[in-house]
Amino acid sequence: MQPDPERERLDAEWVTLNAVRELMRMATHGDSSQSTYDQALELGARICPQVLGDDVSLLKRDRESPTVREFRQRAEAKSRKTGEPVSAASLLESEVAEYRDLLSTARNRQRTDQLKSRLTQMEQALADIAPNRHSESQLIWRDAYSIHRDAPDLKIGQGHKDFLLPDNNVLRVRVTHPERAESISGADIIYERHSPGNRTVNVVGVQYKIWEERTLYLNDDRTRRQLSRMEEFFCKRGLCKPGDTDHTFRFPFCSAFLRPTDRLQSPNQELRSTGEHIPICLINDVKRTGIRGADVLQYDDLRHMSLSYSVFEELFTSGKLGSRTLRYDELQQLYSVFDEMIDKDHILIHAQDFDNWDAAAS
Ligand SMILES: [Zn+2]
């Protein structure tokens, strides 16, 4: 099969976008009004600009208005022609100024309806591409100042970004991914819910992979390696076994989940995903042997034990799913082997959700 760069790019963006959206859902306790695809695209552009940035993303490009696209193309063409970088925003600004100037000449009954409607389109386009757009989601995902805390610190990727959440928790996010965004074939989230007052944490891991026709083949080395990475990190290190401080009324097993995601056929397709979460510990029990002896996971075999995204998020945010409660010294130990979680074909999003307890105290 010939490699198709646009196809690879779209898969990479889609799997990343799904991970970012679920990150937002976990951080806002499943509030769907604060985790739309548009908001996830916004946050994605900020935490992984090489994948979901305005100037590179196929998904973004196809969601922009015809006027925005026209001016992006004009800016590109003009940059080529002059050899100087020209931005779509600056072209729009000068056009808007000219139309306003022309309109100011109108007297009495002169007809200006076409000028006015074009001006409105361009003003809207300018608002859409201006850096401070979408004030609504900016409010929700405000950058938070780093607050001194003694929580374990992880050094991966290009440093961290802090966000202030609606409930006054702080979300600290780190991202690492392969240099070529196109080589991203899956995404991993490690989400930590901290109780800084108790110096404890609960962790959950989710691995996003694209499947076709609700079927995932498990035979190639890459897929096997990626799944066992999760299992080694969570299950085999005992994170899935209850600790003595944990309540026993909860989802019983496994803090590592596989989240297969339907492939997006084209960038302008309506964005929607099914969102089953399968405990990684149980994959061996539900896989079946398919064509030529290959191991496969199929939707029909796993749906009786998988969790929908809303159940998953609700159980995690209410402390009934995820790892056992870890002390900070245990988390520090986990960080010392964190390199094992980094895969050359995956984007890795690491998030620490801090209870506002110590923000108030400091
Ligand atoms: Zn497990």
Image: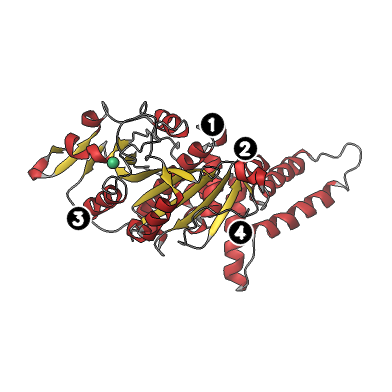
Q: CA distance from mark 2 to mark 3?
A: 42 Å
- Tell me the number on the disc at residue 114: none
Kindly report which numbered mark, 2 or 3, lies closer to the viewer in this rendering.
2
Q: Which residue is mark 1?
A: 31
Secondary structure found at label 1: loop
**Quick one: label 1 or label 3, which is nearer the N terminus?**
1
Q: Where residue 166 is drawn, which disc sits there?
A: 2
Q: Residues within 10 Å of mark 1 (few under 14, many from 20)?
A: some
The image shows residue 146 at horizontal and vertical percentages of 62, 55
| Between 40 and 96, the one nearer to me in the picture | 40
| Type of the residue with mark 4 | Arg
Task: Please state the horizontal and vertical placement of residue 322, each as a whole percent of the image.
Answer: 38, 38
Mark 1–mark 2 distance (CA, rounded to whole Å): 11 Å
What's the residue at 33%, 44% (across, down)? 239
Reading the image, the residue beneath label 4 is: 74
Report helix, strand or loop for mark 3. Answer: helix
Label 2 vs label 4, nearer the camera: 2
Going by the numbered disc 1, the residue's amino acid type is Asp
User: Decide: marks 1, 2 in contact (CB < 8 A)?
Assistant: yes
Label 2 with label 3: CB-CB less than 8 Å:
no
Residue located beneath label 3 in the image: 221
Q: Give how far apart the Cα atoms at labels 3 and 4 are.
A: 45 Å
